[in-house]
Amino acid sequence: MTSGKVSVLDIKGLTKTYGAVTAVDNVDLHIDHGEILGLIGPNGSGKSTFFDCSTGLATPDSGSVSLEGSDITNWSLNRIAREGRMLRSFQKTVVFKKLDVEENLVIAGQMFTFPSVLSTFSVGKRSRMRIEGLRKHARELIELTGLGPVAHMAAGNLSGGQQKLIQFASMLMPDPRLIMLDEPMAGINPKLVERVIDTIRYANREMGVSFLIIEHNIDVVTSLCSRAIVLDQGRKLCEGTPAEVIANKQVREAYLGG
Amino acid sequence: MNNTPLSTTASDPKRRNLRAPIVIALAVVALGAPMVLGTYAVHAMVIALIFLLPAHGLNLLVGYTGMLSLAQAAFFGLGAYASALMSIHLGTSFPVNMLAAIALACVIAVPLGIPALRLRDTSFVMCTLGFVIIGQAISKNWISVTRGDMGLNNIDKPTVGLAGYSWTASNPVEAYYLALVLAAFATWVFWLVVRSPAGRNLVAIRENETLAESLGIPTWNYRLAAFVIAAGFGGAGGSLYVHYISVASPLMFQTLYTTTMLIIVLGGGAGSITGVIFGSFLFVALSEGLRIAPELRMIAYGLSLLILVFRFPQGFAPFLMRIWDWAGGVDKKEGSA
Ligand SMILES: Nc1ncnc2c1ncn2[C@@H]1O[C@H](COP(=O)(O)OP(=O)(O)OP(=O)(O)O)[C@@H](O)[C@H]1O
Ligand SMILES: [Mg+2]
């Protein structure tokens, strides 16, 4: 585990309780540079809560989160995204429904192109050129994710799968270092599943993005991830290659219910 | 024109584009109206133009950022009192008073906004209502400064001076042209704000704040910025108002002012600049015009509101949008508003 090299993300002893439920219980996790790590576990095992606590959406009761060696445990969601370039998706897909696909992506890139809140109020030439640059980048990602034909349609009018692609393309706008995806394939048709998998691979190989992916489909995990971690009732049950994890007796029991 | 970019379908080459003629006609009407209208109608139009200022601010909050604030009337009153007091005690001119009113409203909005913006939804609305009530209490009770219910009277009519020349808007027609220029300028500033990248971030916050946060947008800072800018628009409106009617009194904090601003924005169409411009004329002109029959005024006003909410639940903006599309020769395929 400690190979001397700094991990992209290094989480230690993360714990979160909701009332009587310990949703995440003393979980350690690290992601190496360029890795695609899978996070699996039965419903209610604390995967989404783990995401929330590591991205600043929820405050962990204890534990630490460090990104490339710097402590970001108490950073807000927006700061982790903006300064850490660590982006996350939500299990229940969210897009800016009334805005078209291109506009969704431009918004996603803005805070990474403008140096401050104040500078975003400018409508000068420099500001317009920055937005032009973002539009160009957005169009490239729209092509990459196959959203070209619907680029100027309101995001809310598109299918669930297309919205997942918008969400994913939005996260690629800022040249991210780490992307955390919460069930990116759930409820989308098989053709789009292929496209999402291809895009994740492309972002990983060509753009150097590391990934942490919550995914129920074990075939997807096997094909994408080099390593997987299993959560059960908030605890880390085991970790290893996807094959090792599937073979684990405890994992089988956890999924079959005990 | 509308903040939601919609794909427009190809225009029909056979039909003439009527947009330019419509804009020219509206400009002619705006410039020529005082010459044909009676004094009272001109007065109503001045009020409409003045209320457009705080309404723009409210639109920024409700229509673009998605926060319902009732505090616009408090900043309107603040701007009015600040200008009145400066005019009386310092003898400063209208432009100075107006700039001071804007600055003061913006500065005061920061300590008010910081606690208020921690609240959400109805709690936030109640908190902003509290600001109006506090404003009224101060204006009523700080008698040594505000003269309480007697109010501050005989405020100078707005005078603008440039390079030795000075001009005073001493009657409704002159005030109309002054208000027209200021309202047009305010609209231009508002347009710049909502068209800026920051304006796009405000819309993102309105659409989904958590998603906006997750994309690196510091939503709290933007909401505070919107609150402060809106306050500035409110202060500007109050300053112009007090110099026009030449009286500042605690009545300015009455619910009538708050509801008027709300009706202009919600009735005109939150999130649409043209909708709100249209709204300010329609509602203020309507309520002022109805003064002719005082006993029926409030009833007629109330009835027109009822018709509005049932007939145009989104305000007039979608309706205006359709006219605009029609004028440009665009055939609407499906309504997605
Ligand atoms: N905001 C909350 N308030 C109270 N309890 C919560 C909250 N969020 C999560 N929980 C509880 O924490 C536990 C873990 O939930 P979580 O959503 O993290 O699981 P999950 O592994 O993502 O499940 P799924 O596969 O169904 O998405 C559950 O028992 C859930 O009820
Ligand atoms: Mg979940």
Image (spheres, coloured by chain):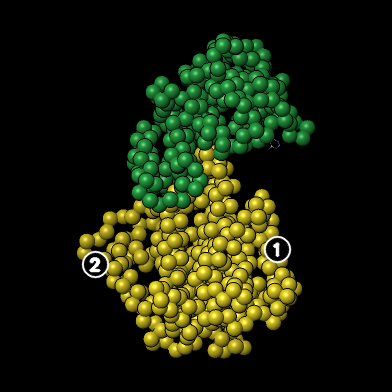
Using the numbered discs, state the Cα–Cα distance from disc 1 to disc 2 in whole angstroms: 52 Å
Quarter placement of the C terminus of chain B: bottom left
For label 2, count other residues whose C-alpha is less than 10 Å away and answer few (under 14), some (14-19) or many (20+).
few
Residue placed at 57% from the left, 67% from the top?
Answer: B101
Per the image, the residue denoted by label 1 is B130
Q: Against A234, is B294 above or below?
A: below
How many marks can you see?
2
Q: Which chain is green?
A: A
Q: Position of residue B318 (x, y in %)?
A: 44, 63
Per the image, the residue denoted by label 2 is B16
Ligand 2 contact, mark 2 (Cβ < 8 Å): no
Quarter placement of the N terminus of chain B: bottom left
Q: Position of residue A71 (x, y in %)?
A: 62, 26
In this rendered view, identify the residue nearer to me: B263 or A124. A124
Q: Residue furthest right?
A: A20
SS assignment at label 2 = loop
Q: Position of residue B9 (x, y in %)?
A: 31, 55
Give residue B241's quadrant in the image: bottom right
- Letter of the chain that mark 2 sits on in the rendering: B
Q: According to the rendering, which colour does chain B have? A: yellow
Residue B323 seen by the camera: yes
Residue B239 as seen in the image, left or right of residue A195 = right
Q: Are marks 1 and 2 on the same chain?
A: yes
Task: Tell whether label 2 touches label 1 (CB within 8 Å).
Answer: no
- Which amino acid type is marked by label 2? Arg
- Letter of the chain that mark 1 sits on in the rendering: B
